[in-house]
Image (tube, rainbow, N blue to C red):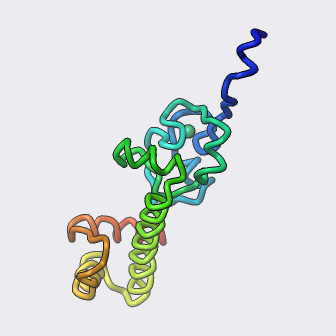
Amino acid sequence: MSIFNLFRKTNLECPRCLGKGLVDWEDIRRLNKQLRWVPAPCAYCNGIGKVPKEQLLKVAVDCTYLTIDLPDSEIEKIKEGHEEAIEKGKQRELFVDNIIRYAEHHLSQNMDAESIANLYLSTEDEKAPFSVEKEHLIKYIQLVIDSKV
Ligand SMILES: [Zn+2]
C-alpha cells in the first residue's frame, strides 16, 4: 500500500443503492419510499456507488427529498447538511404525505382519482408553499389507489 492511501478519504459502499449506482424497486421497498421514489440513478452517491464516510453524518440515506431530479446545486447543499435545503425537503415530504393521506381518506368513501383531485384542489390553501397541477395530481392519486389494491 502506498503511504498516500493513508490520506485518502474513506469511501464506503453507498448505503442507498448498495453500490449499484441505481436505485431500483428493491431499494425503494427496503428504504420504504414507495409512492415517493421511482427507479433512477442514485442521488446519494451520484451514480458512483461509493460515498465519503462523512456524508452519512450530514444527510440521512433515506432523505426523501434527495433525488436525482433536483438541480445539482440543491443536491450539493443537502449533502453538505445545509439547513435551509434540509428544511425545504421536510416541507416537500409533508406535502406529499398529506396528499397520500387525503387520497386514502377519500378512497374509503368510494371516490375515484379525478374526484379526489378536484376536491383536493378546491380546498387547497392558496398560500401553500407547494402546488401541483391537476393532471399530475390525478395520476399520482391513481398510483396511491393502485398501491392499495
Ligand atoms: Zn448510491
Q: Nearer the viewer, residue 112 or 141?
A: 141
62 is higher (above) or lower (below) than 138: above
From the viewer's perspective, is 30 left or right of 69? right
Image position of 127 with respect to 31: above or below: below
User: Which of 75 and 36 lies nearest the eye of the viewer?
Assistant: 75
Seen from this angle, which residue lies furthest top?
2
Does residue 140 appear left or right of residue 134 in this picture?
right
- Measuring 21% from the left and 68% from the top, which residue is drawn there? 133
Residue pictured at 48% horizontal, 36% vertical:
46
Q: Position of residue 23 (x, y in %)?
A: 51, 43
Please state which of residues 23 and 3 is positioned toward the viewer in this rendering.
Answer: 3
Horizontal side of residue 65 vs 115, given as left or right: right
Q: Position of residue 125 (x, y in %)?
A: 28, 84
Q: Quadrant of the N terminus?
A: top right
Give the residue at x 41% y 44%. Answer: 68
Give x and y (percent) for residue 137. 28, 69
